[in-house]
Every structure is written in structure tokens, then in C-alpha cells.
Image (cartoon, helix red, strand yellow):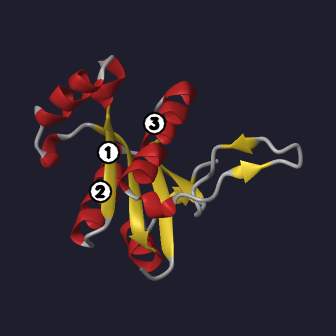
């Protein structure tokens, strides 16, 4: 793969704790689905090992509206990028089974997206997220 990028888009209207929660879940989806993104364990001079980071930076963008988020989602799909999703309904679930059931109830067109992660060729990611600004 050419130069790659990991980008997360979060709906700006979420509460701060929700934004952080969604960001963590979406970043983990890339790490789980793409083991090649894993870096090496961190080892201190004391000889203690700590979990690795992903090899690539994770850029976090904001979507001011649901329409902006949906546009980024559609453009990422059109470009064949790897996509992870987080919907409003997932805030009410407690288990993986609940998560799977919640997502399965919806078509792509009627997902109430609050966040997505996009992973792939850097230029394609940039085009999919065109017009969005980095989260502040």
C-alpha cells in the first residue's frame, strides 16, 4: 500500500465523553482489522514492556452536521477505503451481541452515524474527507 492514513470523523454535536468514546472504539477497529498497523512493544530502560501504538498517526476531524458525516462515509465507500462505523444507537447498547443487533437493523442509507474511521491510501482518504476540518 502507498502512503496510508487513518482518519476519524466525529459528529461535533456529541458530548465530550461521547467523542472520546467513539474515537477510541473507531481507532481500535483499525488496529484489530489491520494487524500490519501495529508497532513494536515499548520497552523502558527498566526493562518493562508496554503495549505498542499503531504505526501511523490518527487524525481526528469534525463533522458539523450529520450530512457532512454521511457525505464522508459515502465518498469513502466510493473510493474503496476501509471504513469503521459508530452510530447513535450504540450508546444504548451494553454487549457485543447488542452492538451487532443494533447495526444489523439498519441499511447503510439509514445509519444514524456519529463517527466513522477511514483507513487507506492517503490521497483517497484526503479526497473522501475533503472539506472537513481537524477537530479542535
Q: Which residue is drawn at 35% across and 50% down?
A: 69
Q: Residues within 10 Å of mark 3 (few under 14, many from 20)?
A: many
Say the numbered circle drawn on residue 70.
none
Of mark 1 and mark 3, the one earlier in the sequence is 3
Front residue of 109/105: it is 105
Front residue of 27/36: it is 36
Q: Name the residue under label 1.
A: 85
As measured in the structure, the alpha-carbon distance from the residue carrying label 1 to the one carrying label 3 is 9 Å
Tell me if 125 is positioned left or right of 45 in this view: left
x, y (%) of residue 37?
50, 61
x, y (%) of residue 48?
78, 41
**Most extreme residue toward the front, as rendered?**
47
Local SS, label 1: strand
Q: Residue at x 41, y 63 (%)?
A: 119
Q: Mark 3 points at which residue?
A: 22
Q: How crowded is mark 1: few (under 14 residues within 10 Å), some or many (20 or more)?
A: many
Is residue 132 among what the camera can see?
no
Of mark 2 and mark 3, the one earlier in the sequence is 3
Front residue of 3/49: it is 49
x, y (%) of residue 52?
63, 50
**Most extreme residue toward the right, as rendered?**
45
Quarter of the image that includes the N terminus: bottom left
**Of circles 2 and 3, which is in front?**
3
Q: Residues within 10 Å of mark 2 (few under 14, many from 20)?
A: many
Local SS, label 2: helix
Q: Which residue is drawn at 53% across and 57% down?
A: 38
Q: Name the residue under label 2.
A: 73
As measured in the structure, the alpha-carbon distance from the residue carrying label 2 to the one carrying label 1 is 9 Å
Tell me if 60 is positioned left or right of 101 in this view: right
Front residue of 114/96: it is 96
Instruction: Verify CB contact (< 8 Å) between mark 2 and mark 1.
Output: yes
x, y (%) of residue 96?
28, 26
Amino acid at each position: 500500500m502507498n502512503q496510508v492514513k487513518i482518519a476519524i470523523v466525529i459528529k461535533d454535536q456529541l458530548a465530550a465523553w461521547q467523542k472520546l468514546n467513539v474515537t477510541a472504539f473507531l481507532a481500535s477497529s483499525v488496529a484489530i482489522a489491520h494487524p500490519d498497523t501495529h508497532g513494536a512493544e515499548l520497552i523502558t530502560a527498566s526493562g518493562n514492556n508496554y503495549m505498542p501504538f499503531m504505526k501511523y498517526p490518527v487524525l481526528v476531524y469534525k463533522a458539523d452536521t450529520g450530512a457532512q458525516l454521511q457525505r464522508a462515509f459515502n465518498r469513502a465507500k466510493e473510493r474503496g477505503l476501509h471504513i469503521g462505523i459508530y452510530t447513535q444507537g450504540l450508546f444504548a447498547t451494553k454487549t457485543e451481541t447488542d452492538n451487532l443487533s443494533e447495526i444489523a437493523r439498519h441499511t447503510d442509507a439509514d445509519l444514524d452515524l456519529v463517527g466513522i474511521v477511514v483507513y487507506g491510501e492517503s490521497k483517497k482518504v484526503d479526497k473522501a474527507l475533503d472539506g472537513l476540518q481537524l477537530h479542535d
